[in-house]
Structure formats: C-alpha cells, structure tokens
Amino acid sequence: MDQESFRSFYDKTMPALRAYVIQCSRSVDIADDFVQEAFVRFLKTAPSTLSEAQMRAYLYRTVESLMINRWHSFQREQRIMREAALESPAVDDRVMNAMTNDMANALSQLDPKQRSLLWLAYVEGFDHKEIAAATNVKEKSVRVLLYRARQTLIGILKHAGVGREVI
Amino acid sequence: MNSEREVCPQEPMILAARAEGRRDDSLAEHLSTCPSCREADALSVRMRQLITVHVDKQPPAADVVWMMARLSQLPRTRWTAEVWKGLAVLAVSALLAAMAWPALQEYLSNILPMRMMTLVPMMVACIVATALAVIAFRTQGLLTDD
C-alpha cells in the first residue's frame, strides 16, 4: 500500500474506529493511542492481499486485543490503587459530552462482545461472515448473538425513556 | 417481542447500504414494508451519529501514522554478492596471516623494538576493522531499510 492509498483508507476508516474505541475506553487519549497503534501494526504486518472489509476487520481485531491488554493492566492498577487507598481515575472530561448521548450511555452498559457485534453490524455495515472474522465468533452464531445484543440495547434505551419509534 | 426468526435476511444489505451511504430503491421499498429492518436502520443511524460527536482533540494524522510505521520498521540486512566477496577476501587474508604468523613475527621483531611488539595485535585489529568499514561503506551500509 502506498502513502496516498493509505491516507485515503485511513481517512475513511479512522473516524468510526476511533469512535468505537472512545465508546469502549471512555478516553480520547487511549482511543488515539490505540487507533494509531492499530494502524501502525496494520502497515507493518497486514498482508497486502486483504480486501477493504478484511483490512477493517484486522484493525478492529487489533484494537480489541489492545483493549483487552489494557483491561488486564487496568485491573492490576485498580488493585494496587485500592491497596494504596487512592481514588480511581475519572472518566475523561472530553468524553463526558459524548456520554450524555442516550445511545452512548446505552452502548456503555452492554457487554463488550455485544457492543462489538452491534458496532460492526450497525456502524461498519459488516455482514455476518465479516463480523465472524473480526470477532472470532462462529458465523452461524453471529445472527443470534446480534439479535440478542440488539434486543438488549433496545431494552436499555426503552428503560432510559427512548421509545422504539424514536430509535 | 420479536422472535429470532423474525430477523429479516435483508438486514445486512440495509445496514451495508447505510454504512456506505448509498440509497437503493429496492431496499427503500423493502424498508417501508419491514418493521424489523426499519428498526435496524434507525438504530444504525443513531449509532453512526456517535462517529460525528465532537471531541476537543485532533486525531493522529494519516501521514504521521505512515511515518511512524516506516520508522518502526526493523532495518533488513542486505547481504549482497559484494558483501560476501569482501568478507571472503577478509577471511582468506586472516587465514594467510595466521599461517604466515611465525615468519611475520620474526620479520617484525627484527625491524621493531621488542616493546613495540605488544602493539602488533592492536595494529592487526585496526587493519581488520578498516577492511570491514570499507566493505560496509562500499555496499552503502550492511543495514539498510530500502
């Protein structure tokens, strides 16, 4: 991939990927670090034969992996902080505006796997096969898991006072 | 509540069209008759709004990411024929020097004072290092990222 094609791919892909990591991590700084790291890894190691959907799936797999690693280190930090009787870090202020959005709040209450499935289907427009490749879920299971995730999300939105007709 | 069988098979196409920002008459017609797809489409619109939520921080620029990837690439060793030839010449020279060392030492002890003999290994090391530097320079570096 040359620099010009990368720029075009990046500009097209980065906003949704960044928004996804912001939703998951609630931190703009972490989102920018992970997005940057994911694209750097992509440039260094992704095979050149990937289709565009596969390239996006690669990026989502990478940020998922980075977030899982961060979650583990965060757990360790939390334990250390509890032991030291310190306060836990607050949610990034810059994300607070975004989090006031009903949808962002609802998504934040979902299980990470459900959030990931919904994002890939409803934001990225991935089909079930592409979702399966990006999330390591069996293709046959995607339909059911996606349906359940959608029902959970709608349930949360309804509970927050957002009607089905407004969704 | 819908049953899982009520999830419309057209839904992935509706969502893909929404993600790509294209409008399709047949899909639009389907949307007007399928409540499940309408709900999915509405959810997609609401979720996609999150992409445009303003954040007071610029994301990393594409060119910066490109540059970082280039800089973090490990340099690859370029073992060209010229490098191999230079190393072979050096190895043969070292072998010949080792074989001729007794005669060479006798010759050197005749022309150099005894205390200078301790400097001979250092001089040999300097010659070998110079030869390696010449090989590296002539091949524009053993390590290159080209």
Image (cartoon, helix red, strand yellow):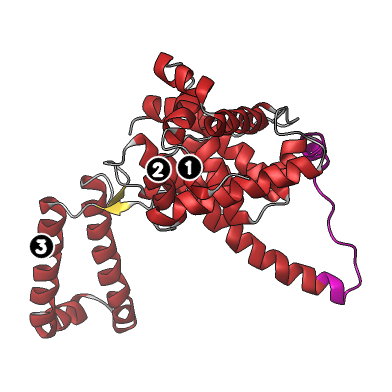
Q: Is residue A91 magenta?
A: yes
Q: Residue at x 56, y 56 (%)?
A: A66
Q: Is residue B71 visible?
A: no
Number of numbered markers: 3
Give the spatial CA distance, label 3 vs label 2: 40 Å
Magenta stretch: give its range: A81-100
Q: Name the residue tied to disc 2.
A: A43
Between B138 and A148, which is closer to the camera in this rendering?
A148
Q: Which mark is residue A39?
A: 1
Tag 3 and tag 2, C-beta contact below 8 Å: no
Q: Quadrant of the C terminus of chain A?
A: top right
The spot of residue A11 in percent (x, y) is 50, 27
- The CA distance from mark 1 to mark 3 is 45 Å
Disc 3 packing (10 Å; few <14; some 14–19; many ≥20)? few
- Which mark identifies residue A119? none
What kind of element bears circle 3? helix
Left or right placement of residue B48 versus residue A77 in this view: left
Disc 2 marks a residue whose amino acid type is Leu
Quarter where residue A102 is shown: top right
Are marks 1 and 3 in one subunit?
no
Q: Residue at x 59, y 63 (%)?
A: A69
Residue labelled with disc 3: B89
At mark 2, the secondary structure is helix
* Residue situated in front as seen by the camera: A61 or B30: B30
What kind of residue is marked 3?
A: Val
The CA distance from mark 2 to mark 1 is 6 Å
Tell me the mark number nearer the camera, choosing from 1 and 3: 1
